[in-house]
Image (cartoon, rainbow, N blue to C red):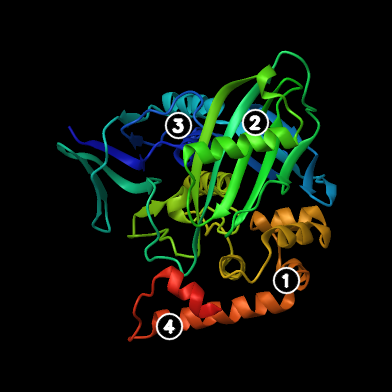
Amino acid sequence: MTVDADIVLVGGGGAASLVLAALEPSPDLRVAIVDPVHKRGQDRTWAFWGTPDPFLDPLLSASWDAVDVVTTAGRRTLPLEPMRYAMLRSAPLYELAAAAEARLGAVRLTVPAESVSDDGDRVVVSGPGGPLVRAAWALDSRPRKPRRPGRTSWLQHFRGWWLFSERPVFDPDRAVLMDFRTPQPARGVSFGYVLPVSDRFALVEYTEFSPAVLSDDAYDRALRGYADLLGLDLSTLQVREIEDGVIPMTDGPFTQRPSPRVVRLGTAGGATRPSTGYTFSAMARQAGQIARAVAAGRPPIPEPAYPARHRWMDAVQLRALDRGLLDGVAFFDGLFDRNPAGRVLRFLDGATGVREDLALMASSPLLPMMRAAAGDALGRVALRSPFHVAVPQEARRTQDR
């Protein structure tokens, strides 16, 4: 039988889990979930910054009032108060979502959604056997590509080891946000980071911002090298868990409203910040906005994850890095050196105003960013031209030089 609902969640990952948890105070709401996998347990870790939050704080594994940024020139400690950097592992969020699902009396269908059709009045989600759910609104968080390729398309890709020691080796009060002492790729930026849960257990990760992923062996070599930099003796440590990920960093546009009653969430809805790959804070904001709209009797449509000017600034930054106009390590280090940490983190979270954005732009290398901005403007004009022909990215990179 086809299920009737007010809202159907298509996809069941982090974005849908946050929405479910936020909707719990709406007991009369009819909710359905369509996803072939019922997410449980630990499958990922989110790190984000923000102010204390009574909704999320009970779920956190750890949080820090200060973080370190490290280069070959030294270590800089960034005080974050009144903000903090926080770590949330997936299992507590999935448990919270499952409890909210039960209290809402939501109907879960563990099958893939093959189509989501919207006639402007109702949405029908269909699976392999035909229609599954008819709903007033669909919130779709399934991964998808942008509606057109970006002028610049990079990836944040990483591998992390959860390391356990029988004796104290980590400082639980010191989180490393970016450690640029790692060998830098020919095209891109690499860094390590350390998020300690206790003095014996920490996530140690190697990350790259670059156009292509690495092999498994390459990630492991990079992690072993980073452990050596940290002075960790891997022969005395246990690798309890391994986390891998690939997150888009692109100025390609994601469509938040593909049709009147379908709303996309998460990366598919533009929640991933192009300049960093961070996603969680925007997903949490979207979930809160949806819940408040539902409680007020309004359509469950969140605001755009980031202001248009921030998306433009990200596009210019990505272009400058991709075309070799900027030294990535010097750029990120200078950004934190010339600005209060809170300003940088609020910008990366999409929360700065125009005056702060202008201050951040003034602290960036002027000539490279102007060249990147000019190239970005020309690229936008070319896309609108009726004579536009797609050019391979490598060719575009050569032309820019």
Taking the spot 43% from the left edge, 60% from the top edge, the residue there is 254
Answer with mark 4 or mark 3, whichever residue precedes in sequence. Answer: 3
Mark nearest the camera among 4 and 3 is 4
Taking the spot 78% from the left edge, 61% from the top edge, the residue there is 334
Q: Which mark is residue 203?
A: 2
Q: Are marks 4 and 1 in contact (CB under 8 Å)?
A: no
Residue 150 to residue 85: above or below: below
As drawn, which residue projects farthest toward the left?
129
- The residue singled out by tag 1 in the image is 361
Q: Secondary structure at mark 4?
A: helix
Mark nearest the camera among 2 and 1 is 2
Q: Amino acid at mark 3?
A: Pro
Q: Are marks 2 and 4 in contact (CB under 8 Å)?
A: no
Q: Nearer the viewer, residue 358 or 381?
A: 381
Answer with mark 4 or mark 1, whichever residue precedes in sequence. Answer: 1
Answer with mark 2 or mark 4, whichever residue precedes in sequence. Answer: 2
- The residue singled out by tag 4 in the image is 382
Taking the spot 45% from the left edge, 66% from the top edge, the residue there is 150
Q: Nearer the viewer, residue 98 or 388?
A: 388
Q: Could you say where residue 96 lies in the image, as x and y percent from the top left?
A: 52, 27
Q: Residues within 10 Å of mark 4 (few under 14, many from 20)?
A: some
- The residue singled out by tag 3 in the image is 27
Q: Amino acid at mark 1?
A: Met
Q: Amino acid at mark 4?
A: Ala
Answer with mark 3 or mark 1, whichever residue precedes in sequence. Answer: 3
Residue 272 to residue 26: above or below: below
Taking the spot 47% from the left edge, 46% from the top edge, the residue there is 294
Distance, label 4 to label 3, CA atoms, is 50 Å
Distance, label 2 to label 1, CA atoms, is 33 Å
Q: Secondary structure at mark 1?
A: helix
- Left or right of 170? Residue 190 is left
